[in-house]
Image (cartoon, coloured by chain):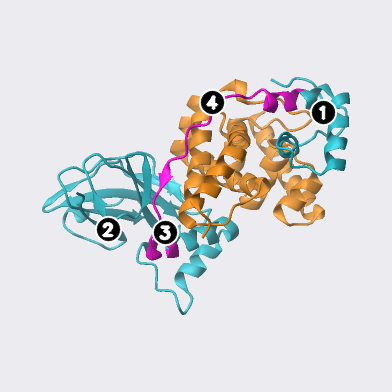
Amino acid sequence: MTAATCIGEPVSWLRLERLALAELDAPTAAAVRAHLDACAACAGAFARIADDARPLPRLPAVEPRGAWARWRLAIGGVALAAGAAVALVALRPAAVAPPPPGGVRVKGAGVVVVRLVRERDGVIAFDPDDVRDADRWKVELTCAPGGAAWVDVAVVQGRDVAFPLAPQQIGCGNAVAVPGAFRITDGAAEVCVALAPRAPDREKLRGGAREGVVCRRLAAGK
Amino acid sequence: MAPASEHAAAYQRFGPALVRKAERILRNREDAVDVVQALFTELIARGAAPVDLPYLYRAVTNRALNVVRDARGRARLLERQQAALAPAPRASGALVVGLDLLARLCDRLDDDHRDVLVARYVDELTQDEIAALYGVSRKTVGKRLARVDAAAAALAAEGA
């Protein structure tokens, strides 16, 4: 732990990281090095960076995304950059863009866009079209920061409806992962994500209600 | 569309710095790695052009704060937090932003102020650096910091 106090204005972690990556221009790098020579606190911080040899896990392979999912990602990008502007964009899409079929409006959250995430043999896919028994699934939501929505996930296979995750309230943000992952066995299924200002009614979901629900059909994978 | 190999190279180059940055917010390595990997898989899937470290710093702040703001994520973080990942502030008299204080301040501040809070008291950026990073004036940064400090003081007073 860095215990000492800086002799002046501490060199930021970002600047120290950029020094370690040799990204600073020569005069700036020289100035930072001069400060480090005189300041034990900042030298200690830089040593934490330089001495960090912990390996980084390999990045999972990612499948390319389809046009529809890219549209939704565009909304996510807006959320990242402009927060509340998401709701406006989703409610008033550009003339060339279709309305977001993966989005529903929820009181207290505005438009919430749902994305299914599948991990198959270490490969991540967003909104894929098929399912295998060994796949691992997660759900991500994008909505304007500051809002919140309850979410429940139903897996529909014929007349069977299963709820793999507990209903939970999620704070809005960009691609917020709903805690928990699940598997879908026995072939084709429809994954339905119910969104509501309070805990969704499971009996209505079992009965086939689809208001405030985003569903995605998954074919049996080969 | 940028090839995935460029992002893989950026992950190798910037990943360790970004994980360290996320660790300072989340106080555990596992969640920090998750945040950084999710960011890169998103960038690869979007085919976005390769990005620089300051851009990625902002993106990691955004994603890490999403975890802190989520009630379940917050409880898990408090359970998992590792003191070793929390360097003491180097500036004399600086606000010490532990995970609990960060979480409580997140409930009271909007995104702009949360960003400034993390930039100033977690990443220890200067006001000029924050202004450049977020594309706002130094005066705006100063105002936002004053609001952050007032919120922290109010929390301290409530706890006293």
Q: Which chain is orange?
A: B
- Label 4, on which residue? B81
Q: Which residue sits at x=54%, y=25%?
A: B81
Q: Pick whichever, A52 or A74, lies toward us.
A: A52
**Mark 1 vs 4, N-terminal side:** 4
Q: Are marks 2 and 1 in contact (CB under 8 Å)?
A: no
Where disc 4 sits, the SS reads: loop
Residue that mark 2 sits on? A216
Amino acid of disc 4: Gln
Residue occupied by mark 3: A112
* Above-or-below relation of B113 to A59: below
Residue at the spot x=73%, y=22% of the render? A2
Q: Colour of chain A?
A: cyan
The vertical placement of A5 against B42, above or below, is: above
Magenta highlight range = A44-71
Task: Give the residue displayed 46% in from the left and 73% down from the top.
Answer: A93
